[in-house]
Amino acid sequence: MISPAAVIVSVLPVYLLIVAGAVLRKARVLRLEHDAGVMQVVYAVMLPCFILDKILGAEVLRSGSAVVWGIGLGFGLLLSGLLIAWGMAHALGLERGTGKRTFTLAAGCQNYGFTAIPVLEVLWGSSACAMLFVHNIGVEAAMWSVGVMIMSGERGVPWRKLVNGPIIAVCIGLALVAVGLDQHVVGPLRKVISLLGVGAFPIAILITGATMVGMAEHEKPSLKILVGAVLVRLMVAPLVILAAAKYLPLVVELRQVLVVQAAMPAAMTPIMMARLYGGRPSIAVQVVLATTVGSLLSLPWIIFWGIEWLGLKPLLP
């Protein structure tokens, strides 16, 4: 059985990297003008390489049903999060034009990338990470379809947003696994892919920490937004995700993914979407900050309880 202390130790490096990013921004080592260029390299090169390195050779992805379940739950559970957040926004008295749409998307979407992957890899290794990338296809599809419609109030869907480095890497990886060619990506080529990918998450999390300290300095918090976000993202939504992991006929790797997803704070993507589609970025920023700080306390316990309830066995002692 894993102990809560072991979970805390496993997730602590992620939060220390966020703090380090904030410190480096305050010390003017990581300057604002560096962010765009660095993240472009991460998204276009480093992250796709990391994804390929984890997917190639992942036996769980040779099962078509496991892949379908992963994508389907990525889409479906994000929709459930949006529904919960919409209800909370209504309870808080938010209306369209005063932040209801932005709160719904920000509080309803968990972090499915840079915070989730290092935690998942420490707890369960490469196979679970490979399943997360498949799960994330469904999440991205929901974000750029239903999420955009909620934020913009329109029915148009910018499907071209799904044509990006990480999604392309997942599709290439799945195709190679499906036909068995992944076993031949070895030697120097595989080593180069691994070396390019290994730094993606430390760098991205540093930039995330630097970005968050900048956001915190310019936002005036609203207590009801902060409390509502914590209730949705760190209390109600985790119960739904863990119930799906418990009662649906899923492979172990997907259950592992859902345990970590249940514990995640809000994603940062809705901040960008609020800026693009006429939402209120300040509300999205508050949701991200509140749930990230709150997850310092909730994340280890949600993972601990999820592991115990589902009877999973982490790599940690």
Image: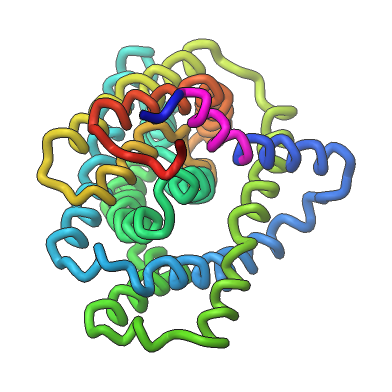
Q: Is residue 159 above or below residue 79?
A: below
Q: Is residue 142 left or right of residue 67?
A: right
Query: Residue 179, how many percent across, how many down?
Result: 23, 84
Residue drawn at x 47%, y 12% is: 224
Query: Residue 248, how many percent across, how many down?
Result: 12, 40
Residue 157 in sight: no
Residue drawn at x 23%, y 35% is: 80
Q: Quadrant of the C terminus?
A: top left
Q: Is residue 147 magenta?
A: no
Residue 301 in sight: yes
Q: Main secondary structure of the magenta part?
A: helix
Q: Quadrant of the N terminus?
A: top left
Q: Is residue 131 above or below residue 100?
A: below
Q: Is residue 254 left or right of residue 2?
A: left
Q: Is residue 64 above or below residue 242?
A: below
Residue closest to the eye, 54 or 275: 54
Query: Residue 301, how many percent across, how many down?
Result: 43, 22
Q: Is residue 5 magenta?
A: yes
Which segment is the magenta one?
4-13
Task: Name which quarter of the figure residue 59 lies in.
Answer: bottom left
Residue drawn at x 29%, y 33% is: 81
Residue drawn at x 43%, y 85% is: 185
Q: What colouring method underlies this structural image?
A: rainbow
